[in-house]
Image (cartoon, grey):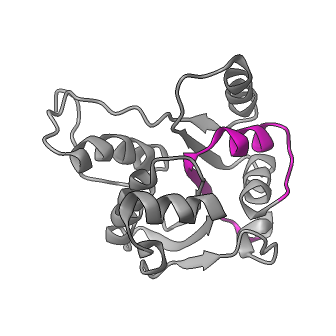
Amino acid sequence: MMHKIVLAIGGSSGAIYAKLLLDRLSLLHEQISDVGIVMSDNAKYNWELEIGDKGYEKYGFTLYDKSDFNAPFASGSAKFKTMIVCPCSMGVLARIATGVSNDLTTRAADVILKERRKLILVPRETPLSLIHIENMRTVTLAGGIICPAVPSFYSNPKSTDEIVYTVVDRVLDLAGLDIDTYRWNS
């Protein structure tokens, strides 16, 4: 099955999660027919601050403007089956949880949820307030998956990238992609 994926990159710290997710998606071209990317202004700023370049422009996937409601995944008819928001800021989470579709990211998430497709949010925030937890609960009840950017260590990662890949690979598993990654007791 060929996957059509929306990747929204939110404005919280953690651009490395988005970068390594894009690196992995680039290698999975035999499983993916389309990846549409949308980034907030803060996402671009944080990428440039934390990674030091504008590499998000160089992956060969289509990068849509945050206000482009003509993007195919702004409608359920385009049949994008999966949306990943990585990293997901608490502001984006709140707007998704309350159905506020004021940009392409939140509109696409609204479409994914209403079509009963797969929405994976990767929040990278700590500590959490009750408001954050309630918004996560609301999204979960609506069918979304909350996959916090909390790495695992049982694979004995040796570098920052290897630590981040423990989260990225979990997200790709949740998205239904066939990946080669560390498996517990395998």
Residue 59 falls within the magenta-colored stretch:
no
Image-quadrant location for residue 129: top right
Q: Position of residue 74 (x, y in %)?
A: 78, 67
Q: Which residues are magenta?
A: 78-102
In terms of image quadrants, where is residue 144? top right
Q: Residue furthest front?
A: 49
Image label count: 0
Nearer the observer, 110 or 102: 102
Residue 110 shows up from this direction? yes
Return the x and y of residue 153 as percentages of the image width and height.
23, 29
Query: Does residue 185 lie above or below 181 as drawn?
Result: above
Left or right? Give the position of 77 relative to 81.
Answer: right
Compared across the picture, whether 152 is left or right of 53 comes to left
130 versus 147 height, above or below: above
Q: Residue furthest top?
A: 130
Is 117 on the left-hand or right-hand side of 182? right
Left or right of 87? Residue 140 is: right
x then y, percent, for residue 72: 73, 75
**Vertical position of residue 146 compared to residue 54: above or below:** above
Q: Residue at x 55, y 22 (%)?
A: 127
Let me know if residue 93 is in the magenta part: yes
> What residue appears at the point 72 percent right and 34 percent down from the top-left corner?
139
Quadrant the C terminus occupies? top left
Q: Is residue 181 visible?
A: no
Q: Residue at x 45, y 82 (%)?
A: 60
Q: Give the image location of residue 15, x and y in percent.
A: 45, 55
Q: Residue at x 40, y 72 (%)?
A: 53
